Image (cartoon, helix red, strand yellow):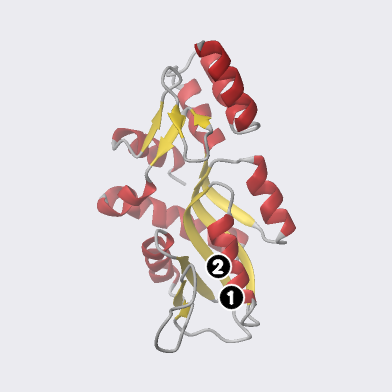
């Protein structure tokens, strides 16, 4: 799998940025050394092809019984489409909520009670949106065997939420992968790598320390 090349492409195209000197402030109030905009990946053919190949390989390895690929609206839909094409499997997509007109569908495409669905999203923070899609499909009596994602921050909240939902997550890339590659390539010092490593394990504690150090 071309994970190192994918990570390098994400950095080169400024889809992923890391800055310890000026951490990014999220809407939640958390300070973070990482900023991501994975929606940009769909505009870069070489990168989206590597991502689709990697996701397809992961699904073949971890979800060999999958019969349907599902995209989580909206960012997961294009990746799901490319993966479904590679695996020659049917495609569905799941809205955040049912339509308020027409047939009121939340799930578009055809699935049956016998299907085994893998849902794809681009980015996992706490997992709320994709797990909402998992619930919607399961409410139709259809088996969701797991989730695949392009990237995960690896936050404790996500681990808990996926465990509580009894749902397997297989990410292509993780925050830990990203900073490990940067450290290996001497882009971060040992001290910087240590600071980066602690963020995703306890982001609120990290925020408090960074705010205190800035005073």
Asked whether the beta carbons under mark 1 and mark 2 sit within 8 Å of each other, the answer is yes
Taking the image as drawn, is residue 65 in sight? no
Secondary structure at badge 1 equals helix
Measure the alpha-carbon separation of dots 1 and 2.
6 Å
Please, is residue 142 above or below residue 45 in the view? Answer: below
Q: Which residue is drawn at 42% across and 35% down?
A: 35
Relative to residue 96, is residue 68 depicted above or below? Answer: below
52 horizontally vs 131: left or right: left
Residue closer to the observer: 38 or 181 = 38
Residue at position x 47%, y 47% in the image: 1
Give how far across and how far down residue 24 sits, in percent: 43, 30
Q: Where is residue 73 in the image (x, y as percent from the top left)?
A: 43, 65
Instruction: Name the residue furthest bottom.
Output: 103
Q: Mark 1 points at which residue?
A: 137
Residue 99 position in % (x across, y down): 43, 78
Residue lying at 55% horizontally and 76% vertically, measured from the top left: 67
Side of 154 where 99 appears, left or right: left
- What kind of element bears circle 2? helix
Residue 169: percent from left, percent from top: 62, 55
Instruction: Give above or below for 40 relative to 195.
Output: below
Above or below, 184 against 53 in this view is above
């Amino acid at each position: 799998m071309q994970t190192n090349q994918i990570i390098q492409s994400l950095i080169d195209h400024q889809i992923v940025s890391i800055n310890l000197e000026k951490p990014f402030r999220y809407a939640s109030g958390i300070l973070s050394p990482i900023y991501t905009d994975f929606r940009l990946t769909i505009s870069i053919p070489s990168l989206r092809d590597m991502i689709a190949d990697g996701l397809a390989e992961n699904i073949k390895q971890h979800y060999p019984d999958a019969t349907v690929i599902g995209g989580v609206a909206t960012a997961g839909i294009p990746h799901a489409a490319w993966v479904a094409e590679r695996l020659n499997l049917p495609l569905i997509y799941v809205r955040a909520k049912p339509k308020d007109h027409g047939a009121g569908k939340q799930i578009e495409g055809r699935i049956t009670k016998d299907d085994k669905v893998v849902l794809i999203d681009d980015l996992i923070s706490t997992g709320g949106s994709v797990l909402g899609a998992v619930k919607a499909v399961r409410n139709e009596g259809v088996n969701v065997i797991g989730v695949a994602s392009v990237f995960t921050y690896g936050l404790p909240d996500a681990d808990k939420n996926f465990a509580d939902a009894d749902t397997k997550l297989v990410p292509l890339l993780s925050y830990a992968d990203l900073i490990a590659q940067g450290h290996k390539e001497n882009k971060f010092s040992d001290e910087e790598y240590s600071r980066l490593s602690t963020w995703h394990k306890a982001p609120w504690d990290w925020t408090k320390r960074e705010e205190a150090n800035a005073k």
